[in-house]
Amino acid sequence: MKISAVLRETARVYREKFKEGALCVLLQLALRLMGAAPLLALVTKEVPYLALLSIPLYLLIVPVARQNMAEAMQDAIGGGALLSTKLVSTENYGKKFVQGLKHAALLLLWSVLFIAATIVALWAYAGQIDAFTLVRVLMQLGGGSFMNGIKLVLVIYAATMLPIVIGCAFHSGARHAIALGDKKLVKGHRGGVMLTWLVGLVALVPFLAVVAGVGAGFVSGLVDALANLGSGSITLPTIGDKVYMIAAAFVVLLLPLLPFKQLMSAVYVRGLKK
């Protein structure tokens, strides 16, 4: 199925189910917040370890919810309802749960570099690496320039997220194939699945532009903070009041367009079945 045909069909369903799509995004967000609720324990000194409950709770809720959403999208493409009780259905829960865990495990493998880089960064920030040793390493990476070393490290850290993006694109059609009753539907069509998912990212550009604008100030503050690393202590910058700007951009720029991106993969995989 050509991308142009996918875009036309996606636009049709998106127009017809616009309100339902926005409400579905809110429901999916609410379900994820339910899974993350135990993280509130981190603000307490008495029982911070209760935050670990978010891991099993998230796994019990979100993978099944994602599969339910895939089924609802296939219904919507066929002329049915997008917003329905199917989104919170427990039918075939065990099967959906196991399939969701497999998908999560695969994405975890794509995230190994990012996780490892984050652990090293937290380890260094916690003071496990001597500040002067860290400064020397950064200067070596920057060809004798401390600031160039910092910038290079930040670029490398950002690059560790690239495999995650590729992994998400590679596996994006799996839940839709399952929703259509054929797990092997995307086999031999991974290139098209990935291209469709990547093209769908265009819908996120307005929101990402706002985040990039806020993030640029944060990164600049981070570079300045790391420049004082030789003093033995650093203070990381905070987003501060700009978090409200991101929240507003989420409501105005992301919430209305996210269903379009999600529907693109659903439409492409359905086209493979036809």
Image (cartoon, rainbow, N blue to C red):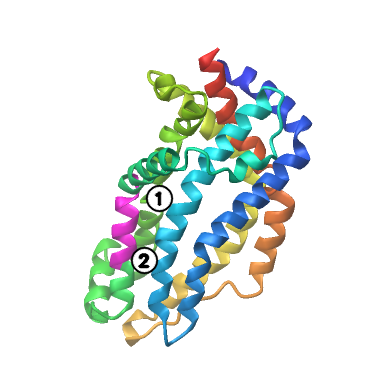
Q: Residue at x 29, y 74 (%)?
A: 124
For disc 2, the marked residue is 150
Q: Is residue 246 above or below residue 124?
A: above
45 lies left or right of 69: left
**Kind of residue at badge 1:** Met
Q: Residue at x 71, y 49 (%)?
A: 253
Q: Secondary structure at mark 2?
A: helix
Is residue 273 within the magenta segment? no
Residue 41 x, y percent position in the rendering: 47, 77
Is residue 111 within the magenta segment? yes
Residue 227 in sight in this render: no
- The earlier-in-sequence mark between 1 and 2 is 2
- In the rendered image, which quarter is residue 4 located in? top right
Q: Residue at x 57, y 32 (%)?
A: 71
Determine crowd level at label 1: few under 14, some 14-19, many 20+ residues with C-alpha closer than 10 A: some
Q: Secondary structure at mark 1?
A: loop
**Kind of residue at badge 2:** Ile
**The C terminus: image quadrant:** top right
In the depicted view, which residue is nearer to us: 211 or 67?
67
> Separation of disc 1 and disc 2 at Cα?
18 Å
Which stretch is magenta? 110-120
For disc 1, the marked residue is 161
Q: Residue at x 67, y 45 (%)?
A: 24
In this view, the mark in front (1 or 2): 1
Q: Residue furthest front?
A: 91
In the depicted view, which residue is nearer to us: 89 or 145?
89
Most prominent secondary structure in the magenta stretch? helix
